[in-house]
Image (cartoon, rainbow, N blue to C red):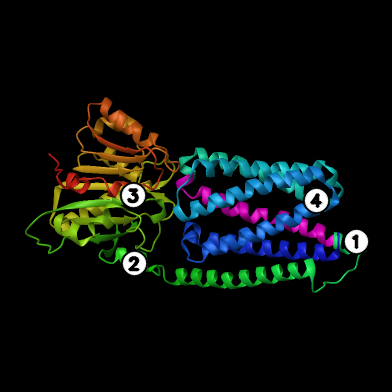
């Protein structure tokens, strides 16, 4: 192998470490919101391309050294890693977990561990830094595999931020491995007897072009990403789409007697008349709506955006209350996570003192994490609500006896991996066993994102506003 090859390997290893480090730092800053930045998809593709080039360089190195066991171990890792990358892009863009993504999330750390074993016990172990890198890979692979299995089976981990934190720290730790391999290449370069210079043609020219293009792309989109992160930090309302949806809703903040704060948006009925009473619709967002901006939760709900439509506002005049759950909290119903259900109830009672709200026409809706919240609140406060629409949620079937007199219309996708369909099925079955008669719509070919399917359900709003607590 030539000094030219080792120099290229060192350069791409350095670029790869830098881009992963930047992504990791940005992830710590923004968490789930990182995927919402306009430049992130392109940045992620650049990271994917650099990773691909880096792994091909490694593959060529092991082939040239005739480390065949390590070569095939890396080939397996490359195949599984890029399948996982491709599936990750879809998850980032849709926030919807698929069966194939879950499988890939388990296979990749197993492939990492296998590659690590090949570095430790095959012919490549003669190179000190390769062996050390193999030990780290084996350790990281086993820890990540255990963590992934835990996150997949733990509802709490998915909602309290544990899964995000695990991913963030794993990406930081994984940087150690390319650094160790970089040290190996540097040692190989110094030991190389073939002292050749870069030429202007052939393979050297191609490598130089790729090097320049990679550096230029990374610099340009790194600057854009940094600018967007800065804008988001300084102005959390910078997303015009979210602003547009939230604009008809008044921004409000509630503080209880203990200093606990809940931010929320409120849509008032058209031509509000205090001599009349109006229904109150509580709309609970999913986990991606968490935060402190008091904006994005409107776009993460379903009924709230439906009722802000001028036609629906005129047909169904109502107050629409859209609270925003703080980071790493939930609406209730998920164990070991701080719940803000009591604050939601406090705001409802405060609104009823301030406005002419019909207490017999309180309607509650929610999607995903909000679906959990709906099941939880109607199960623990069954006398409060006239009707409920839980979407992609789950509850406690032991409390089904409290729900027999509440009109419920639940929705779920049969292929949902974010919240398994059994969550809704078990609740509906338990209520029926107690003598209740809830409505349930299951979309057989749909997964977690069923908003358009629910919106397209004929008569949904008419059914909701026809309900009245007896």
In the picture, residue 288 is in which quadrant?
bottom left
Q: Kindly tell me whether residue 385 is visible in this rendering.
A: no
Q: Residues within 10 Å of mark 4 (few under 14, many from 20)?
A: some
> Tag 4, which secondary structure?
helix
Quadrant location of the N terminus in the rendered image: bottom right
Determine whether, in the image, residue 217 is placed left or right of residue 35. right
Per the rendered image, the range of residues in magenta is 158-187
Q: Check residue 62 in the rendering and tell me which mark sits there, or answer none.
A: 4
* Residue 293 picture quarter: bottom left
Q: Earlier in the sequence, mark 2 or mark 3?
A: 2
Residue position marked by numbered label 1 in the rendering: 191
> Is residue 171 highlighted in magenta?
yes
- At 71% from the left and 58% from the top, the residue drawn is 54
SS label for mark 3? helix
> Which quarter of the figure is the C terminus placed in?
top left
State whether the magenta stretch is mostly helix, strand or loop.
helix
Tell me what residue is drawn at x 67 percent, y 44 percent.
141
Q: Nearer the viewer, mark 4 or mark 2?
A: 4
Residue 455: image x %, image y %? 28, 49
CA gap, disc 2 to disc 1? 60 Å
Local secondary structure at mark 1 = helix
Residue at the extreme left = 275
Q: Which mark is residue 451?
A: 3
Q: Earlier in the sequence, mark 4 or mark 3?
A: 4
Labelled pair 2, 3 in contact (Cβ < 8 Å): no
Image point (74%, 44%), residue name: 73
Vertical relation: 27 (above or below) 363: below
Q: CA distance from mark 2 to mark 3?
A: 20 Å
Q: Examine the structure image and report whether residue 58 is included in the region drawn in magenta.
A: no
Residue 243 has which mark? Answer: 2
């Amino acid at each position: 192998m030539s000094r030219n090859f080792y120099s290229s390997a060192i350069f791409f290893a350095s670029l790869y470490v830098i881009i992963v480090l930047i992504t990791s730092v940005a992830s710590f800053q923004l968490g789930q919101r990182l995927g919402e930045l306009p430049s992130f998809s392109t940045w992620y593709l650049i990271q994917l391309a650099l990773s691909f080039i880096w792994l091909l360089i490694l593959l060529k190195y092991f082939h040239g050294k005739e480390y065949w066991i390590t070569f095939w171990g890396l080939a397996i890792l490359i195949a599984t890693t890029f399948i996982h990358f491709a599936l990750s892009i879809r998850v980032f863009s849709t926030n919807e977990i698929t069966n194939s993504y879950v499988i890939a999330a388990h296979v990749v750390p197993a492939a990492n561990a296998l590659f690590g074993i090949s570095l430790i016990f095959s012919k490549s172990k003669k190179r000190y830094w390769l062996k050390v890198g193999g030990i780290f890979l084996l350790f990281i692979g086993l820890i990540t595999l255990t963590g992934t299995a835990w996150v997949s089976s733990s509802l709490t981990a998915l909602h309290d931020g544990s899964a995000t934190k695990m991913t963030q720290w794993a990406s930081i730790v994984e940087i150690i491995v390319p650094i160790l391999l970089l040290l190996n290449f540097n040692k190989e370069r110094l030991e190389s007897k073939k002292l050749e210079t870069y030429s202007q043609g052939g393979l050297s020219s191609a490598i130089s072009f790729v090097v320049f293009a990679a550096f230029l792309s990374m610099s340009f989109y790194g600057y854009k990403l940094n600018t967007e992160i800065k804008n988001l930090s300084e102005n959390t309302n910078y997303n015009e789409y979210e602003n547009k949806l939230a604009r008809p809703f008044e921004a409000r903040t509630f503080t209880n007697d203990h200093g606990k704060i809940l931010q929320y948006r409120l849509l008032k009925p058209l031509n509000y008349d205090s001599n009349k009473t109006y229904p109150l619709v509580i709309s609970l967002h999913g986990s991606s709506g968490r935060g402190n901006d008091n904006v994005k939760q409107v776009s993460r709900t379903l009924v709230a955006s439906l009722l802000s439509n001028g036609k629906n506002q005129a047909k169904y005049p109502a107050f629409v209350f859209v609270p925003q759950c703080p980071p790493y909290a939930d609406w209730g119903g998920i164990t070991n996570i701080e719940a803000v259900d009591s604050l939601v109830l406090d705001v409802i009672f405060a609104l009823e003192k301030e406005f002419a709200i019909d207490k017999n026409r309180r309607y509650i809706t929610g999607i995903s994490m909000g679906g959990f919240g709906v099941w939880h609140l109607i199960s623990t406060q069954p006398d409060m609500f006239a009707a409920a629409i839980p979407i992609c949620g789950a509850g406690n079937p032991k409390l089904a006896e409290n729900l027999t007199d509440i009109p419920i219309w639940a929705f779920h996708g049969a292929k949902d991996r974010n919240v398994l369909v059994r969550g809704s099925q078990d609740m509906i079955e338990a209520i029926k066993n107690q003598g209740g008669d809830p409505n349930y719509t299951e979309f057989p070919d749909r997964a977690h994102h069923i908003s358009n399917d629910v919106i397209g359900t004929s008569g949904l709003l008419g059914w909701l506003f026809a309900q009245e607590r007896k």
